[in-house]
Image (spheres, grey):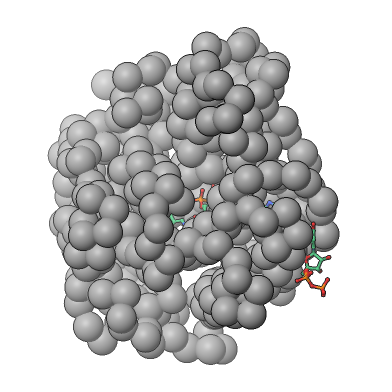
Amino acid sequence: DVLSKQSLPTSTTPYVMKTAYLPDHHRKKILVTGGSGFVGSHLVDKLMMEGHEVIVVDNFFTGQKKNIAHWLHHPNFSLIVHDVTEPIQLEVDQIYHLACPASPPHYQYNPVKTIKTSVMGTLNMLGLAKRVHARILLSSTSEIYGDPEVSPQPESYWGHVNTIGPRACYDEGKRVAETMMYSYQKQNGLDIRVARIFNTFGPRMHPNDGRVVSNFIIEALQNKDMTIYGDGKQTRSFQYVSDLVDGLHALMNNDYTQPVNLGNPSEWTIAEFAEHVQALTKSSSQIIKLPKSTDDPQQRRPDIQTAKRELDWEPKVSVDEGLKKTIEYFAAVLKEAGEIIPT
Ligand code: NAD
Ligand code: UDP
Ligand code: UDP
């Protein structure tokens, strides 16, 4: 596991990293859209360390250049600043299509753009995959299950989504992106993979992206109020980013073409999770309750039998191990920003 063995830089370090040597016939050209974002940049690390040629396409809406700065001068790496809603012609063997804002404040900031990113962005990537006969993997989401009436959620569950609520731009965008993937498979014989990703956390999450893990850790480290939206009884299941990256890689390189849940079944109420982060950071923060978010899913937990059976994949990193690394990361980010972290 390259992520745990290498101490990859987390901030701007413009030097060339050493990568494995792959003979030409094993080296692939791999496109990662959204590759400067949280998940994408960790995936780029894995693919680069394996010795592949990696092209990142990103418009830097929520991505950060510092997430990929350590590759900028590597001969196997290219960065194209480009919006996936516009067509692009490239020559690649595989496409990991991740470009899309993922946190509710970011995807609700400009809902029309979020829909365009999922619909036109995925269409363009499918057109590209069709033209060059590349295998394409879509990063879909547990959000396609909406506010689920069954738990845990298996891939066979069709979901419970409000088509006109504030989350719809993201949920319905990803649902139609999945539909397009299977339509191109049926009509054009495209080689597709669909990952349904559940809540993921780790270093390089954007400090201002408003997701629960980053909010709680940053609030706790600063001894500020920790903000629960609603009564805190809603649940989420949290997966560490290296497990997700391994799962995406396993899915891409496997023959299974139906959707696959990737997540850690370890389920927490948001109130329990707040107390846990408070304890791990030895914070003196107060935990306070704010109004509930509209259409907030009340329970979310992946059924990962498909990933176990088809990919021989399951999460390896416990939530506590992952939280420890993420807390260290945010402590460093706050320090860099000149924030005083009470000890
Ligand atoms: P992120 O916001 O950190 O990364 C998204 C990346 O896509 C950013 O680099 C952003 O600049 C780029 N992007 C957005 N719109 C674009 C556009 N129109 N053109 C080009 N680039 C664009 O989010 P993340 O957590 O890394 O999520 C990556 C993918 O995984 C997303 O598709 C998301 O829906 C999916 N996902 C993530 C989670 C999670 O918990 N992190 C859960 C489910 C699904
Ligand atoms: N497309 C792209 N790069 C390519 C090939 C296609 O961005 O290398 C875009 C193309 O502009 C179109 C979309 O992908 O908007 C779907 O392409 P497809 O060939 O399926 O549809 P068509 O062009 O026939 O509408
Ligand atoms: N949440 C919270 N406080 C925060 C941020 C989020 O209580 O500061 C809640 C949010 O209402 C939701 C859960 O935590 O019930 C997960 O939210 P997140 O935005 O991380 O992801 P998603 O809702 O997309 O799963």
State which quadrant residue 48 falls in.
top right
Quadrant location, the N terminus: top left
**Residue at (64%, 37%) from the top-left corner?**
29
In the image, is 38 to the left or to the right of 282?
A: right
Residue 117 against residue 248 in the figure, above or below: below
**Residue at (67%, 56%) from the top-left corner?**
133
Quadrant location, the C terminus: top left
* Numbered marks: total: 0
Residue 210 x %, y %: 47, 54
Nearer the observer, 81 or 167: 81
Residue 276 x %, y %: 17, 46
State which quadrant residue 118 falls in.
bottom right
Residue 81 x %, y %: 78, 41
Residue 31 x %, y %: 64, 44
- Toward the front, the furthest residue is 25
Query: Looking at the image, can residue 55 be seen?
Result: yes
**Residue at (20%, 77%) from the top-left corner?**
151
In the image, is 22 to the left or to the right of 285?
A: right
In the image, is 41 to the left or to the right of 310?
A: right
Residue 293 against residue 274 in the figure, above or below: below
**Residue at (33%, 64%) from the top-left corner?**
261
Nearer the observer, 105 or 205: 205
